[in-house]
Amino acid sequence: MYSEKVMDHFSNPRNVGEMENPSGVGTVGNAKCGDIMRIYLDIDENSVIQDIKFKTFGCGAAVATSSMATELVKGKTVNEALKITNRSVMEALDGLPPVKIHCSLLAEEAIHAALWDYATKNNLVIEGLKKPKSDVHEEEEELVY
Amino acid sequence: MENKIYLDNAATTKVRPEVVETMLPYFTEQYGNPSSVYEFASQSKIAVDEAREAIAKSINADKPDIYFTSGGTEADNWAIVATAEAYKDKGNHIITSKFEHHAVLHTCEYLERRGYEVTYIDVNENGIIDLDQLKNEIRPTTILITIMFANNEIGTIQPIKEIGQIAKDNNVLFHTDAVQAYTHLDIDVKDLNIDMLSASAHKLKGPKGIGFLYIRKGIKNRSFIHGGAQERRRRAGTENVPSIMGFAKAVEINMATIKERTEKELELRNILMKRVLSEVPFTRLNGDKNRRLSNNLNFSFQFIEGESLLIMLDMKNICASSGSACTSGALDPSHVLLSIGLPHEIAHGSLRLTLCEENTEEEINYTVDMIKEIVQKLRDMSPLYEDFIKKQNRR
């Protein structure tokens, strides 16, 4: 079902983790639909993304696109990072099955949400960056195990 | 483990070698068409007749009431659509449950679009249908109750005898999809008041593409597949002789071994269940702990998504399935898991393991070890788990 690159990024995801005091953090998706992605950014004074970490709840495609997106963004400037689209992530992964294309949108959205958080914290206006959709469900029902 | 560990027997099963052996002569030696007149072909006719007899016996049915089909799905479609049409003078109302197989649900939806009314009975949190609701929903126009014998995802066994009695008392026909239960549980259609029953061979170590519909004598029914006079003019098409022979062989073996198989399955299943529930935190068992098929387990692992889990199990050579939306390409997770009241995110993290008597304790223990490792790996990657742990630390 998945390309070799997808399988590689799924089984050995790059940049998984959390970050203390990130420059920006964004969480998108919702648990109801089965995928949530969180991106942490460490951005230096020259607007270069020095480090990036992610956490994803989701299918193989969601994990692989998160991982690939972090690789594409790391070391880039904020403006360069903004240009990374779901299409570029997908191409870098040698494609995704058609039913999984929506998973790749999440990675782009998560990066944008983290950049928005960075911009808000620093009172910056980043050209071309829109406020992210906030459809992350805060724990709706708690199930007792 | 180098060899594959197959824990998806509710999806399909490995055909028994004895079954294959039984089938082979009917491809190249006794290939005659049972409808032909010459002596050579009549051997096929006799063989099919004997197979029908054996299958009828397995559910205490009469031989002419067994109609071979292409499988469980066709049998479900036939039972529901043909009954709806044959009894439309009596009424247009059908009762089913919310967690039927799609072969039943989508057929009911098809009839709804054609003016029939369908009531979908609720399922309780343990995966058993609500009998009181069933009784209350029966109307003068109700023509059919169709409720599955045992659920395909969570394995829960339904109160079939009670449903049969309710149907009989109210003069309503009762069809049951017994695809998962047949030859795994004892079924006596007369004792249980079952009017129609669907079954499939490939769930019981028989070939794919063959099943049957039992239709009790006296029930109005029409031909569903039009053509020749096969299956007492009710199901046209040249009999799939090799598959029918294989089906009967598989049934024969399964019925003769039902007790030992069940015991072995329960032994393995209980090891699997106990270890997973005690060794993997934030895990629940979906469906009643006791009223379920001996080979079925269905877990939900909180904070993770099922497809990821399946792919990682596959990398360890373990075959399983999940009710996650991502495994089907749909947006919603399994309707079965939602019907028992699971929140979406818990349903997404489900894992179905369905074993058979050929699995070994070694395989089961390896599987648990792998599940533990993989679930932890996925949780370490999950923002939901991160939030949960942070919240706990604040407390």
Image (tube, rainbow, N blue to C red):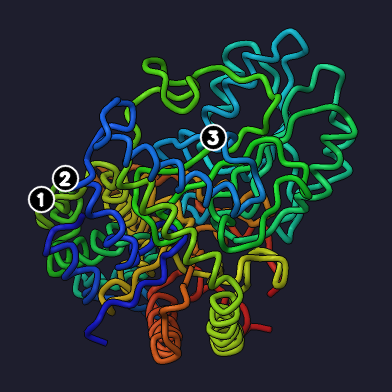
Residue visible at 45% across and 41% down? B49
Residues packed near mark 1 inside 10 Å, few (<14), some (14 to 19) or many (20 plus): few
Q: In the displayed structure, would residue B41 be above or below residue B127?
A: above
Near-viewer residue (B356 or B124) = B356
The residue located at (16%, 53%) in the rendering is A89
Residue B87 visible in the current orientation? yes
Q: Which residue is the site of mark 3?
A: B76
Q: Which residue is mark 1?
A: A91
Q: Which residue is mark 2?
A: A87
User: The residue under label 1 is which amino acid type?
Assistant: Glu
Residue located at (55% from left, 64% from top): B255
Q: Does B170 sit left or right of B103 as displayed?
A: right
Q: Secondary structure at mark 2?
A: helix
Q: Nearest the camera: B163 or B376? A: B163
Query: For residue A40, what is the image quadrant?
Result: bottom left
Q: Secondary structure at mark 1?
A: helix
Observer-nearest of B365 and B184: B184
Which of discs 3 and 2 lies nearer the camera? The answer is 3
Looking at the picture, how far across and down is residue B361, in whole percent?
45, 90
Question: Label 3 is placed on what type of residue?
Answer: Asp
Left or right: B380, with B179 as reference point: left
Q: Marks 1 and 2, Cα distance to the nearest angstrom?
A: 6 Å
Spatial CA span between label 1 and label 3: 44 Å
Chain hosting mark 2: A
For badge 2, the amino acid type reads Arg
Can residue B351 be seen here? The reply is no
Q: Are discs 3 and 2 located on one and the same chain? A: no
Disc 1 vs disc 2: Cβ atoms closer than 8 Å? yes
Q: Quadrant of the N terminus of chain B?
A: bottom left
Q: Chain of mark 3?
A: B
Specify whether disc 1 shares its chain with disc 2. yes
